[in-house]
Image (cartoon, grey):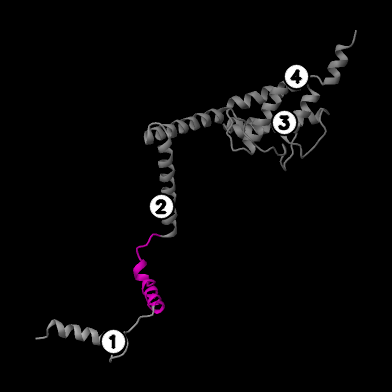
Amino acid sequence: MTGRGDVRAVLAATAHGDGGPPASWDRDPAREAAHRELSDPRYHEHDPNLLQRAWTAFWGWVQDLFDAAAGVTPGGGVGVAVIVLALIALAIALRLRLGRTAPTSTRSAAVFDAHPRTAAGHRAQAEAYALDHDWNGAVQETMRALVRSLEERGLLSPHPARTADEAAAAADLALPGHSDALRDAARAFDETAYGGRTADETTYHHLTSLDAALRHTKPADTARNTAGRP
C-alpha cells in the first residue's frame, strides 16, 4: 500500500522531471489554447443576438435614467411615474387638438386632365358622378366646369397647367366677392384629387352653388363701370 510519502514523491518527480529544474508553463500558449477552446460555437449557442443585446442595453439605460430621476423627484419612483403620465396625457391632448385645427398640407396640381371638355361637358360628368354617389368625382368635375366656364367667358386665359389654387386666385380677381368660397373649392379639389380625402354630398352642393353664382356675377371691370354711370 502506497503511503502519503510515496504520493508526494511521485508528484515531485512529475513536477521536476528527471532531477531537472521545476517545470514551468508559458502563459501565452495557455491563454491561446483557452481562447481557442472558448471560441467553439458550442459554448455560444444560447448567447443573445445583437438585437437582444441592444434591447437589453436600451432598457438598462431607461432604468438608470428612471432611477436617477427618482432620486431627485419628490415621491421617488411614484412621483416620476405621475409626471410621465401627465406628459403623455398632455401630448395626446395636443395631438387631438392640433389634428382638428391644423391645416392639412396637400399638394396642388393642374385642374384639367388629359381629356378637356367644355364647361357643359364637365357639369354633365359631375351630375353623372353625383347620381352614382361618387362625390369625389362630382366635386372635381364641378371645379373643372367652374374654371372652364370662366375661360369660355374670357375672364381667365386658357392655361392647361393652372392649379386649383391659381384658378381660385385668378377667379377672385375677375369676379370679386367669392374669395372664401373659391378657396374652399380649390381645397376640396386638391384634397379629393391628391390628398386622399373623401368628399360628401354637402361639399358637392357647395361647389355647384358657387358655379351657379359665378355664372351670374359680373366681372370686376363691368361692375365698376355700371356703378359709375349717372
Magenta residues, dominant SS class: helix
The CA span between labels 2 and 1 is 51 Å
Q: Secondary structure at mark 1?
A: helix
Q: Which of the pair 45/13 is nearer the observer?
A: 13
Between marks 4 and 1 in the image, the one whose residue lies nearer the viewer: 1
Q: Earlier in the sequence, mark 3 or mark 2?
A: 2
Between marks 3 and 2 in the image, the one whose residue lies nearer the viewer: 2
The outermost residue toward the left is 1
The CA span between labels 3 and 4 is 19 Å
Q: Point out residue 187 in the picture as x, y percentages from the top left corner.
A: 66, 31
Q: Amino acid at mark 2?
A: Thr
Callout 1: 10 Å neighbours few (<14), some, many (20+)? some
Q: Which mark is residue 145?
A: 3
- Determine whether 192 is above or below 225 in the image: below
Q: Are marks 2 and 1 in contact (CB under 8 Å)?
A: no
Q: Are marks 3 and 4 in contact (CB under 8 Å)?
A: no
Q: Which of the pair 132/154 is nearer the observer?
A: 154
Q: Disc 4 marks which residue?
A: 177
The outermost residue toward the bottom is 18
Q: Point out residue 37 in the picture as x, y percentages from the top left corner.
A: 36, 74
Q: Earlier in the sequence, mark 4 or mark 1?
A: 1
Q: Is 32 one of the magenta-colored residues? A: yes
Q: Is residue 139 left or right of residue 146?
A: left
Q: Residue at (86%, 20%) from the top-left corner? A: 221
Q: Disc 1 marks which residue?
A: 16
Q: Amino acid at mark 1?
A: His
Q: Which residues are magenta?
A: 27-48
The CA span between labels 4 and 2 is 64 Å
